[in-house]
Image: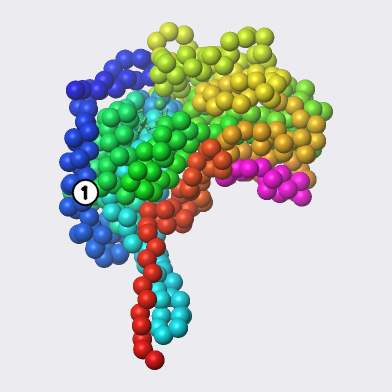
Amino acid sequence: MTLTVLEPATARSMAEIPEATPEDVDRAVERARAAFPAWSAVAPSDRARLLLRLADAIEAELEPLALLEARNAGHPLASARGEIGMVAATFRYYAGGVERNLGDTIPVAGGVAMTFREPLGVVGLITPWNFPLPIASWKLAPALAAGNCAILKPAELTPLTAVELERIALQAGIPEGVLQVLVGPGRTVGQRMVEHPGIAKIGFTGSTAVGAGIQRTAADTIKRVTLELGGKSANVVFADADLEAAAASAPGAVFDNAGQDCCARSRILVQRSAVDRFLELLEPAVTGFSVGDPLQDGIAMGPLISASHREKVASFVDDDAQVAFRGSAPEGEGFWFPPTVLAPVDPSARAATEEIFGPVVAVIPFDDEADAIRLANDSIYGLSGSVWTENGGRALRVARAIETGVISINSNSSVRVSTPFGGFKQSGIGRELGPHALEAYSELKTVYYATGA
Ligand code: NAP
Ligand code: MG
């Protein structure tokens, strides 16, 4: 079977690639298990050096990788360059972790206990289409640094950069079988990975519904899981905030990557007394958001990933009366959708509760601090978010009170290689990035050494 990979800006085929089967999963697990003893025994300094070489090799191919990602995922080329740069930075960061994957020594009666962070063995990594290579690297880099062998299944819609990464890793000297990429459907290839008794852990990023199924299936083999799932993050703007700064930042916080971002601030909660002024400031920022060919300079937003996804996004804007204002988008071929602001939105409306994963934002008024916290937490999700206020005490109170894994004060930034990232509630289990991710790809072992009396 072959898979046709589309370019979302043109809706045309850009590649045909062979599709893996569940039997290929079995073979990949065998190869990974064969590679594991030698890979896990590589001296830490040598493993670190190999990961640094891989980072350099990715950087050496940054331009073609960025172009491939921009075409296949529809990301503006400048954004894609930044993303591939982050992939290299992620491998570099975890190369630095290999020799710092430390245990403890614990004095106990009759001897000493010490702990080691042992690799898990073979891990299965399943990734979505929205940020294909960065999200793969957030899993691969700590997994390999901790001494595991990894099998990566990218999303069928955007597999091309992952296939290149497998080649680059081999060329950089990562041994055969340590990093394998299988392109195939989630319901067959992904499913087989989750069932396979030879895979110790699944690192998954994707929808909450698929994540729930993975956790159920993983239960049969007591597989470890890290799940990075959906979001419906709140961008909370108090009347005492720098409204110009908040309004200038808000479009990028939800329309970057056409809203196909688990961290998208897709609910803007604005204190009632500031709503009119905020919308007045927001409108030019939204209508000025340039949507078009991702390969052209100066483009802020490309197309959606597919025709069916565009249909899903459009279903949230069935009533034009809700639209306060919107930007423009190209006509014709390609899966285009304009940046769209719905205001005011009732907190119980579908657009305020469900993850849209597209360039549609709901503006919801609130009365006071308690009301803002209540509304922000009125969600099954808890991944990201922001709070804008010039009152320092309030900023920290609200940041602490919102049930979310990552929150920014007077900023909409979300992700850094060196800081933990992940969700509260149905946004997931576990954390990626930062020092903790190494632990998520290790087992803690306690060794007791009896020294005698
Ligand atoms: P998805 O439909 O859940 O798919 C994610 C991955 O899982 C794909 O590789 C998919 O394969 C695979 N898959 C599907 N069914 C499977 C099954 N039964 N067993 C094993 N694997 C299976 O998500 P998506 O549509 O690609 O991405 C959008 C979602 O990802 C959004 O909900 C978004 O919030 C979430 N997301 C979360 C984060 C985060 O860090 N929290 C980051 C990015 C995205 P195929 O598609 O190839 O069939
Ligand atoms: Mg999907």
Residue 164, image x, y percentages = 26, 37
Residue at the spot 36% in from the left edge and 89% down from the top edge? 452
Residue range (magenta): 392-407
Q: Is residue 121 magenta?
A: no
Residue 414 appears in the picture as rendered: no
Colour scheme of the rendered structure: rainbow
Q: Main secondary structure of the magenta part?
A: helix
Quadrant assignment for the C terminus: bottom left
Reply yes or no: does residue 400 show up in magenta. yes
In the image, is residue 305 above or below residue 174?
above
The x, y position of residue 396, in whole percent, is 71, 49
Relative height, residue 307 to residue 269 (above, below): above
For image coordinates 22% across by 55% down, the residue present is 36
Respond yes or no on whether mark 1 lies under 8 Å from ligand 1.
no
Q: Quadrant of residue 246?
A: top right
Identify the residue position indicated by label 1 in the image: 32
Residue furthest to the front in view is 220
| Residue 58 shown left or right of residue 255 in the figure | left
Q: Front-most of 293 and 166?
A: 166
Classify 53 as above or below 81: below
**Rendering quadrant holding ligand 1:** top left
Q: Quadrant of residue 103?
A: bottom left
Measured as percent of width and height from the top left, residue 420 is found at 51, 50
Check the picture and name the quadrant holding the N terminus.
top left
Q: Residue at x 34, y 51 (%)?
A: 143
Residue ID at (28%, 17%): 13
Mark 1 residue type: Ala
Q: Position of residue 370 (x, y in %)?
A: 77, 39
Within 10 Å of disc 1 (Cα), the crowding (few <14, some 14-19, many 20+) is many
